[in-house]
Amino acid sequence: MSDGLEKICRDMADRAKAASRALAIARGSAKNDWLKRSADALAKRAGEVLDANALDVAAAPDFGLSSAAIDRLTLDPKRIEEVARALVEVASLPDPIGEVVTSSLRPNGLDVTQVRVPLGVIFFLYESRPNVTADAAALCVKSGNAVVLRGGKEALHSNLALHRVLQENLPLCDLPRDAVQLVGTTDRRAVGRFLEMSDRIDLVIPRGGESLIRRVVAEAKMPVLKHYQGNCHVYVDASADRDKATAIVLNSKVQRPGVCNAAETLLVHRAIAPTLLPELAKALQSEGVELRGDDASRALAPGMVPVSTTDWDTEFLDKVLAVGVVDSLTSAIEHINKHGSGHTEAIVTADLNAARRFVAEVDSAAVMVNAATRFHDGGQLGLGAEIGISTDKVHARGPCGLRELTSTKWIVYGDGHVRT
């Protein structure tokens, strides 16, 4: 790596570290003022952002982006309004910093509290979607963290324009300008350099394809908050209401098939499969979904192609669904725990005991009972917003909002206490 690039990365990380110390003691009102000012500025400077985005969209075919990826890349006046609205919504959320988690007065007179504190510096990597620039900056600053943003090269002009709006308003609110920085180079070696800086960066959050996330995990010297895949399942139990089952399966698969909480596998109990599966398959196929079924499924619903052994482990991110008939709730749970990615699973059932077993025994970040997998989302679950979804089991699991971007500190008040 050239000395010049290494120095740029190191200087950015040093400035972020300094900014994080100032943010840790920043007033909540100052952070909210910045979010609201940024929203207003974004609305006023929408043309500037849209002009920059047009450059990225025009170059998208050169990067080999699919039509779905180009759609995620594209901004328009409505999407700019949504980005601005999201900033205001984050401002309305409770500030987690200083929140008392536990408090007690010990028998020896020590006053003990556990409070929320920022993590410090977050290195955030993401692909294609420029609106994520504002979302990530908003959540990090509100939770008292400095952030170094590194978007994909396909969205560089858009990200730079959004970053200018966000950064220029920080000093106006008595917040450090370096609280939000954007890596301006597209040189992939810069990512590797940041991933080595465990003395400056406290957490890495990659948001993108599995190859990006695996690279980050392999190279990072600090903790990584992530999920590799969203291989999500819907299991229709023997007692399920057919109309509810149909609605939930369709919504889980079809509403947005290219996202991490879309269903990739459908499992149907053998007792209900003969009456449910033919009509359900027809409804899915009418929405353009390719069904890949096991022998039992294909016998009940012609038109499916044979499922392969690898399909059970695949996140299709498209209108493709693996379908299987299972003999029991136990079989469904075993299949999910074997092939699932620990992201989101759903059961459709009228049997409360079956629901309780499913919830207790399925090992995933989110488990839905009679609800679509698509509800595994920070906004939908009441967090207000999220920076990503984690399938890890340490520190944070599921949608990561403001609280998940904090740690805790123990504070002890005594009066000359000594331990004997």
Image (cartoon, helix red, strand yellow):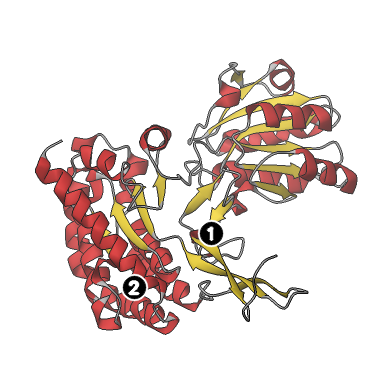
Q: Residues within 10 Å of mark 2 (few under 14, many from 20)?
A: some
As helix, strand or loop, the secondary structure at mark 2 comes to helix
Check the image and report above or below for 329 versus 147. Answer: above
Is residue 229 visible to the viewer in this orientation of the structure? yes
- Where residue 334 sits, quadrant-wise, is top right
Kindly identify the amino acid type of the residue bearing the numbered disc 2: Ala
The x, y position of residue 256, in whole percent, is 50, 46
Location of the N terminus by quadrant is top left
Horizontal side, residue 199 vs residue 110: left or right: left
Seen from the viewer's position, the closer of residues 191 and 136 is 191
Task: Report which quarter residue 213 is drawn in.
Answer: top left
Cβ–Cβ under 8 Å for marks 1 and 2 = no
Q: Residues within 10 Å of mark 1 (few under 14, many from 20)?
A: many
Going from N to C along the chain, the mark reached first, 1 or 2, is 2
Q: Position of residue 57 (x, y in %)?
A: 22, 49
Label drawn at residue 316: none
From what the image shows, is residue 415 above or below residue 338?
Answer: below
Residue 5 screen position, x and y as percent:
14, 44
> 256 and 347: which one is in front?
347
How far apart in space, not on screen, are marks 1 and 2 (Cα)?
A: 20 Å
**In this rendering, would 34 be left or right of 329?**
left
Residue 404 shows which numbered tag? 1
User: Circle 1 sits in a helix, a strand or a loop, which is it?
Assistant: helix
Answer left or right for 143 relative to 197. Answer: right
Tally of numbered discs: 2
Give me the residue at 41% from left, 76% from top: 25
Residue topped by disc 2: 22
Q: Which kind of residue does numbered mark 1 sit on?
A: Glu
Q: Going 31% across and 75% down the picture, which residue do you hit?
A: 38
